Amino acid sequence: MNLSMPTDAEKTAVHKRLVFYIPGYDPFHPRRYRELYRKEGRAQAEISGYDLQLSARKGEGSFGWDVQSHIDGTTTETTIEVLVWSDIVRDSMASSIPATYLLMLQTAWRYIASGALFRLMRLRKGPVIAALYPVVFLVVQLLIALGLGFAVAWLGRAVGGIGGGAYLVVVPVAYTVLRWFKEHDSKVFAHYLMQDYAHSAQYNGAYGPDLEARLEEFKTRVAAALSSDVDEVLVVGHSSGAYLGVTVLADLIRSGAVTEARPQLGYLSLGQVVPMVAFLPKADRLRGDLQYVSQRDELIWVDVTAPGDGCAFALCDPVAVTGVATAQQKWPIVFSAAFTKSLSPARWQQLKRRYFRLHFQYLCAFDAPLDYDYFQITAGPLTLRTRYSERSPSASRITEAVNIYTSVS
């Protein structure tokens, strides 16, 4: 029988963890994330030399899965739950073609009239180009559709001898072409991205009532976890989910649900697009939540992006660039996942032009990993605080306040 005393590492190791994953603007069933975790986790474990086993969710609750890891001599049991808002996304995407073009005009006007578009360009041009991309594609699609409509009308007059009535076919032909483009949007993501930006901007930065209600449900789920016997509660927000996570945690801390007696609380934001919303005039609540969470001792907040991800505001401190940082700011610790270094040259060549795939690389395996490993963070023996509290932020992070809307609620 081994009666030796446990080491300090064994005393502080995570044996039980609850992870809450908040996706970005994604209409798909959350099982997509489970299968991604299964595939990429297996690959990362093989590369890095540890054991990771995924199994079906035990017990009741929202959609999720269980993970058991064995890393550095410690076995850790993790339950990962997806905080689902894909139904809200699907509802927002169920608009007609004319409605999509109206949304395009409204969204463009909100960003241009408020000046947000030009200030966002001062941070990173990549995500701004990504925002303009669907506008350009939708305009080009409209021009092609109208061009084909007029071509059919001209042929009707020139070949068929049809008079001025030939131009009555322009609208139905153009609409048929636009419908074909929409049916094949999975190739170019023009409609999808347009709906994404329109949804974020529809209330000029404020949350809509449907999202407010869902955030309240998220807060209830995380609060229950903080009353459980786990060693760590970890919230992960990806893309648009990053700013939703900030609001959930701000509400939790204000409510008194987070105390020193609770499990350790960590927040990991990945590929964040916070400025796309925080720079809008009516984002008072989000700006207030950013400021509040950045000052709190009840949690640690780590923000991971990468310059290779053209859809994220890479290395932009979301609190500082929004203009709400104070002298008491502690978080987030901003650093880069360094795609060009943590992916082998061959793998980087395969992925570097797959822009939307790279936006999900944070959730995937790295074949030349550095100090960022999504699977060790979410399923390994170290808390987020233990892993990164002493980590220096990237020297190239951007902290210049460029937002003019700094009111908070």
Image (spheres, rainbow, N blue to C red):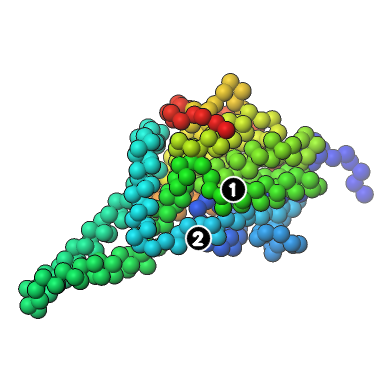
Viewer-closest of 297 and 107:
107
Seen as rendered, the residue at the extreme bottom is 160
Residue for point 20% across, 68% down? 170
Amino acid on which disc 1 is placed: Glu
Amino acid on which disc 2 is placed: Asp
Residue for point 29% across, 51% down? 136
Q: Left of 169 or right of it: where is 72?
A: right
- CA gap between label 2 and label 1 equals 15 Å
Neighbours of disc 1 within 10 Å: few (<14), some (14-19), many (20+): some
Does any portion of residue 331 appear in the rendered image? Answer: no
Residue 162, given in percent of the width and then of the height, sits at: 10, 76
Please name the residue that numbered disc 2 is placed on. 91
Residue 202, given in percent of the width and then of the height, sits at: 45, 47
- The secondary element bearing badge 1 is classed as helix
Q: Are marks 2 and 1 in contact (CB under 8 Å)?
A: no
Viewer-closest of 365 and 264:
264
Residue for point 35% across, 51% down? 104
Q: Left of 306 or right of it: where is 290?
A: right
Q: Which mark is on residue 283?
A: none
Q: Earlier in the sequence, mark 2 or mark 1?
A: 2
- The secondary element bearing badge 2 is classed as helix
Q: Left of 175 or right of it: where is 306?
A: right
Write down the quadrant of residue 185 in the picture: bottom left
Write down the quadrant of residue 249 in the picture: top right
341 relative to 349, above or below = above
Neighbours of disc 2 within 10 Å: few (<14), some (14-19), many (20+): few
Does any portion of residue 295 appear in the rendered image? Answer: yes
178 relative to 365, above or below = below
Residue for point 55% across, 42% down? 243
- Of the 4 image quadrants, the one containing the C terminus is top right
Residue 350, given in percent of the width and then of the height, sits at: 40, 54
Please name the residue that numbered disc 1 is placed on. 212
